[in-house]
Image (cartoon, grey):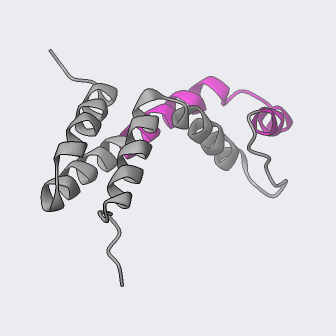
């Protein structure tokens, strides 16, 4: 049985509270890679689904979704914004965001401090 991106992120998020230090960083790193993969997969789906819409319709859809666009943005950027809005509402994205926020409250982050 193949585990989906969402299932794996949820598993990592569930394991995170009991993890510390380098183990937590490894969980975050894997979850981040899965987050990026999930967003890319959804972006492809959204591009296929909305690729035939007129640019004005894409701009309207983005504005309706709460992501107002600048008229200088091209179609690809607008489609990416729409995919991001959709992705951020998934269980996987929400679990990852909560995991990263909880880790940050514990002083663990993927971005090294300077």
Q: Is residue 13 left or right of residue 97?
A: left
Q: Is residue 78 left or right of residue 57?
A: left
Question: In the rendered image, which quarter contains the N terminus?
Answer: top left
**What is the residue that sits farthest to the top in this orientation?**
1
The quarter of the displayed image where residue 62 is located: top right
Q: Quadrant of the C terminus?
A: bottom left
Residue 24 horizontal/vertical position (percent)? 20, 54
Find residue 66 and report its horizontal and vertical position in percent. Answer: 75, 40
Decide whether the magenta segment is chiefly helix, strand or loop: helix
Residue placed most toward the observer, 12 or 51: 12
Q: Place residue 25 in its image quadrant.
A: bottom left
How many labels, in total? 0
In the foreground, 78 or 33 = 33
42 versus 23 height, above or below = above
**Residue at screen point 66% across, 31% down:** 51
**Residue stretch in magenta:** 36-64
Image check: 40 left or right of 74?
left
Residue at image coords 21%, 48%:
27
- Quadrant in which residue 89 is drawn: top right
Residue 106 colored magenta? Answer: no
**Vertical arrangement, residue 104 with respect to residue 54, above or below:** below
Compared to residue 31, the image places residue 42 above or below, namely above
Task: Please say whether residue 60 is one of the residues in the magenta stretch.
Answer: yes
């Amino acid at each position: 049985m193949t585990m989906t991106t969402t299932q794996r992120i949820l598993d990592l998020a569930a394991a995170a509270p009991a993890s510390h230090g380098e183990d937590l960083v490894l969980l975050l790193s894997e979850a981040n890679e899965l987050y990026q993969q999930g967003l890319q997969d959804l972006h492809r789906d959204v591009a296929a689904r909305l690729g035939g819409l007129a640019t004005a319709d894409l701009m309207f859809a983005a504005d309706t979704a709460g992501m107002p666009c600048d008229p200088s943005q091209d179609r690809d950027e607008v489609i990416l914004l729409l995919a991001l809005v959709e992705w951020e509402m998934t269980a996987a994205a929400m679990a990852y965001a909560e995991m990263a926020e909880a880790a940050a409250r514990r002083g663990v982050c993927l971005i090294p401090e300077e």
